[in-house]
Image (tube, rainbow, N blue to C red):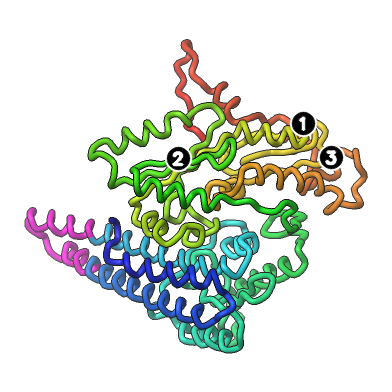
Amino acid sequence: MRFPRYQELFRGLSLQLKGLQRDSKELGPLHALQRQLIRAVLSVERRVLRLKRARHRLTRMKAKSRLPKERAVAVKALTAAIDDRVDDLHQIMFLLRCFGDGIAFTYQSKYALKHLMFDEKYQAKQQPGFMTGKKGFAREYRVLCSGIRAGVPVLLADITNIIRHGDVCAMGGPDPLPIEVKSSRTKRERPQRQISQLQALADFYGNDRAENFRGAPNVRRTELLVEEATFEGVMNDCIRQAMLNGTAMAEPETGLWYVAVHVARLEPGRETAVLDELLLPFLGKGRLVVHPTPDSTWWHMLPFTLTLDTGNTLAFIQREVLIFVVVDVMHAKELFRQAGVHAVALFDGTWAFQISQDAEDFSAGVFRVSEQHFLRVTHDFLSLRWFVEENAAFLSASLEKFFPHAEPGIEGEVAGRFMFDEAQMAEWRSVRDVWDREDEAMPSEEDGRGRPGTTR
């Protein structure tokens, strides 16, 4: 167990969050859960600060005097141990904030919340700083309490990973409303930039569109066209079976598999061999194996604190259980084909798929699906078939819905979501599936070149 000291705290937070999921209209439990999260995060922050002060004293001691070799080695080892412990405590704060994320996603759409994680350049904003010693924290907490007393669900941003705009966030409307709490009016650059970003977000939420949103032109926001299908229950059952039997596998639909491993039930010394044996049948051309882990790589996905039940959440946090999601990308391409859509599997670190009505003629619509969006299949435990059907439906509707004045058949004027020039269209026409690109990069007997690493 990684963090035994915090096991009961995590359990209590999970049970409270599950209760809030069942009845989010009751704001008393919302307030109580936030108070417990605030106390827990503050406690961990104080431990981090104490360790950093101790490390600073050790560094000064080394700098001021020439220590005997044995003592210098001991100081170096102690410093490294402090650094490791600080890293662990930062991980604990991340996990605590995952429960805060669970609050946010209980009240608001995951597709709306993701915009609160990025800055004006579509880069992830800096993570929350410490609440300890923060000027204005008491004021932020008073705003939180006032909102809840008024019957509005309000969430403190500093106890979440996802909300990185504003100090508190009102969640009673159709979209999140981040609020910057300031003690006085100021014309300094940073507060003005924050206000400008909040206004851009409010305009985008209000209009469902922006001519330029964080550097991306002609951005539109639309509702899902196909009802979302998830396999949360299948993943939870798979984890429970692994906890009983050591390993478990489930295939919720064609082209999608879940694998779970209870590490403690494996024969000591054979952990790696068992994992290899489990995953080997899934390896091959067009197969993608994703290993979701309880760390910051979760990004803006639906938090596991909501999708996993309490027992599974604790096992996942403590890494007592490992989970893997395997996707047959070739099958996804076949599903696109059945929907009348041409799909290219890119997986270049940014884009997962390029889809179009026609491989050459983009006038009927074309767009790219990001890897971040595709990873909702593996982290939100969504249906692969649903993912294909939703994007195929969006492609069919995109020209008519978002560009009603575009003349059909005029190549280069409008292509799906974006405006193109000829050079960009030529580049998009030339793309090929990732496995075809990798096959070309395979070393030949003559040149001895090494094969590049895979995308993920």
Quick one: SS at disc 2?
A: strand
The magenta span reads 56-81
Q: Position of residue 306 (x, y in %)?
A: 50, 62
The answer for how far apart the CA atoms under marks 1 and 3 are is: 10 Å
Dot 2 or dot 3, earlier in sequence: 2
Identify the image quadrant of residue 213: bottom right
Q: What amino acid is at disc 3?
A: Ala
Q: What residue appears at the point 38 percent right and 57 percent down from the top-left corner?
A: 317
- In the picture of the structure, the residue carrying the numbered disc 3 is 364
Whether residue 423 is visible, yes or no, is no
Asked whether, in this view, residue 1 is left or right of residue 241, the answer is: left
The answer for how far apart the CA atoms under marks 2 and 1 are is: 37 Å
Q: Position of residue 68 (x, y in %)?
A: 7, 57
Frontmost residue, 430 versus 298: 298
Count residues near mark 2 (Cα–Cα under 10 Å), then give few for <14, some for 14-19, many for 20+. many
Q: What amino acid is at disc 2?
A: Met
- In the picture of the structure, the residue carrying the numbered disc 1 is 359
Q: Position of residue 63 (x, y in %)?
A: 19, 63
Give the vertical position of 371 relative to 158 (above or below).
above
